[in-house]
Image: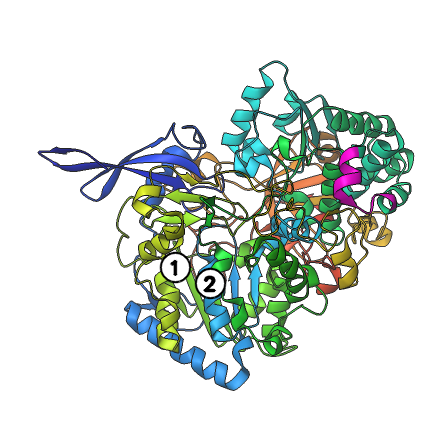
Amino acid sequence: MIDRVTNEGIVETRKIACWPSPGCATNCGMLARVKDGKIEVLRGDPESPTRGAVCAERFPHLLKWLNHPDQLMYPLKRKGERGESKWERITWDQALDEIADKLKKLKAQYGAETLSVVEGTYRTDLYGIRSRFLNLFGNPGNMGTAGVTCGCNKTALQFALGGANLAPPVVTMIGLDKPGCFVFCGSNLPQARQVVWRNIKKRMQEKPKPKLIIIDPRRIDMVDYAEMWLQIRPGTDAALFMSWINVIIAEGLYDREFIDKWTYGFEELKKRAEEYPPEKVAEITWIPADKIRESARMYASEKPAFITLGLATDEIGRNGIRVEQARICLHAISGNMRAEYGSAPQGPGPVINGEMGIRDSMLQLEEKCTPEQRKKQLGSDRFKLMTWPAYEIVNKYYKQTYGVPLAMSGHNFSVAQPLIWRGIVERKPYPITAMITWTSNPLLNAGNTKMVYKAYKSPNLELHVVLEHFMTPTAMLADYVLPAACKFEVPCLSTTEDFTPFFRVGEQAIEPMGERKDDYLFFRGLATRLGFGEYFPWETKAELHNYRLEPLGMTFEEAKDIYTVASDEPWSYETINLRTGKPTGFATPSGKFELYSNVLKELGYDPLPFYEEPLESPISAPDVAKEYPLILITGGRFLPMFQAEHRQLGMGLREQHPDPLMDIHPDTARELGISNGDWAYIETLRGVIKMKAKVTTNIHPKVINCEHCWWFPEQPAREPWLGGMWESNCNVLTMDDPDTCDPLTGGWTMRALLCKVYKVRTV
């Protein structure tokens, strides 16, 4: 909208969403004042779902991020060896021509399965288009996503057990004014989702105020507001939740009416939970039995109640997905899945006047991937929950129930990245010779950095294309680096990979700077050159958005002013399905929420949740613990950073948090001769890094916490430095051997590892 015309030019106000790059995953609504094509001022929009709130640490510096001199502006082609930091500037046409020609040759030599796509943080709204491209190319779906260890694994399980996504309120911003009890497990909102935490704190000041239970080995800031803090041993969350199920069933605190009408397998779950009495679980988790009972009663008694799992439980490798299975079983038996609480699985949308908008799944063309090709997908023979075997089962019931396909996005369809790296290096089960890396920096965020580096440096990888905003360590090892437009520079229309039954809308604030392009033009450009451009008829992303909104009777121009395009009514299991005239139920084999999962059983997995000891712990690996006596957790989020981003000096973000920090208890530090602020080494069986010691009583004496994704862009962008990626990168310490991964999803191990710490000695 045009605000005014002045002597100095046209001043407009645009409604935008602060998605990852430049911001974070909370997607705060913002107003951008634009003058002569440049953003002058940003402010929170009180009419947005986030009600005008913005993060204090990151938000004031977003324009410095946008205008930082290190932003990539032009396509680059590697000249020397990978890692020499020698580049030549080329045109987009040359880049796309050469990339397409190479893909044709590699496909002819090795088959379409030779291509892999690696992706991460939600920095795009085009996952449906990515799937469309791969299916038309003939690829079996070799997509390696960080979502395997970043929330998407949980969603895959939710589809298997409940037939739909069960998004917690911290994701949707819906229902924050309702809960009688919040449970946060491995989730530190003040650092990860500050705006959501601000809303919850406001609720804590009202009457009646909700109860708050924190499950974390650290005494995070949220503990100050909590009724209970359960200082858990890292990696034992499934045991705790199974004990909660034990207590709730034994004491009759469950919702018998909901269980009888809407769940399947209660007796089997009851029998399994009997194996986890509080006294036994107290020895496993370090949490006293009386606290286990008290917290279970509090959760079951205060209605409605939400359990929100952070990424911590996704990152414990083996047994990680079973934490989510126990959580959603708790959600069901306690009655908190009732539709009136706003926390029931929801069907697809948005649906307005009986018509549905075009979701990601309706763009993907999964039928173009043949049965023969599907069998070639990496990991589909062992990590079945997020590959074709589970997809085909769940999609059958999803289509029967809702009439549309299930999305082949990261949340329910993803290859375990460790298999991709080994497909490059070992060429097994077949050669992976081409890779597109977008929305991700795997040399920082993937497990076992040494293996990732080996793959990216391998001559077996004949083509590596990176789409990026900055020259990251991963981009430093690419053959082509293409400058991606950021969320300020493109219009957004998103179902968040079909996580949500509505569209999130964000207006384009400015034209792309330099020669940056949006991701849609990249995939469309390749498709045209590879011979299937007719499937990409929309010349621009804006045309694509209008196509997606057309069934709803609106244009993007109309939608951009309302941020969220939602259904007339939420679609839950109680909603009358227009296709059948009966309550929709759950899109599962039984038509109910499955406490005992028929899908997992058909895939060859245990249908019930259970606890399994972490692979590398004082109990499972006592010999290792003799040399590495401390338990390591990595990946804790911290402001003002988001994932591996915002490390560049000059934005005002790195200046707030200049050095990587490790949390260590005073007793442990004293024993090791380490003082607050000392640089210290952290060592595991895989490698050694260094961080500054933050001596604090907020962590258990036997646990070390180190920050994630640290690199130093001010260091040289060539070997051996590669932007300082080796110095303090916690994934140098983590493991990713496929045999150590979660057997359902392929999630690798980044927490509950054994380590030792010692002071850096200066001469």
Name the image colouring.
Answer: rainbow
Indicate whether residue 637 is drawn in magenta.
no
> Tags 1 and 2 in contact by the CB under 8 Å rule?
yes
x 30%, y 63%: residue = 539
Secondary structure of the residue carrying tag 1 is helix
Closer-to-camera residue (755/482): 482
Q: Is residue 331 left or right of residue 171?
A: right
* Quarter of the image where the N terminus is located: top left
Mark 2 nearby-residue class (10 Å; few <14, some 14–19, many ≥20): many
Q: Which mark is residue 130?
A: 2
x 67%, y 46%: residue = 585
Q: Position of residue 128 (x, y in %)?
A: 47, 59
Whichever of labels 1 and 2 marks the residue nearer the N terminus, that label is: 2
Q: Is residue 3 left or right of residue 753?
A: left
Q: Is residue 677 at least partly visible in the picture?
A: no
What segment carries the magenta color?
257-267
Quarter-of-image position of residue 408: bottom right
Q: Is residue 563 left or right of residue 573?
A: left
**Residue kind at label 1, given as amino acid type:** Asp
Quarter-of-image position of residue 30: top left
Between marks 1 and 2 in the image, the one whose residue lies nearer the viewer: 2
Q: Which residue is mark 1?
A: 519
What's the distance in space between the residues labelled 1 and 2, CA to CA?
9 Å
Closer-to-camera residue (87/127): 127
Closer-to-camera residue (105/480): 105
Q: Position of residue 47 (x, y in %)?
A: 38, 29
Secondary structure of the residue carrying tag 2 is helix
Total number of numbered discs in the rendering: 2
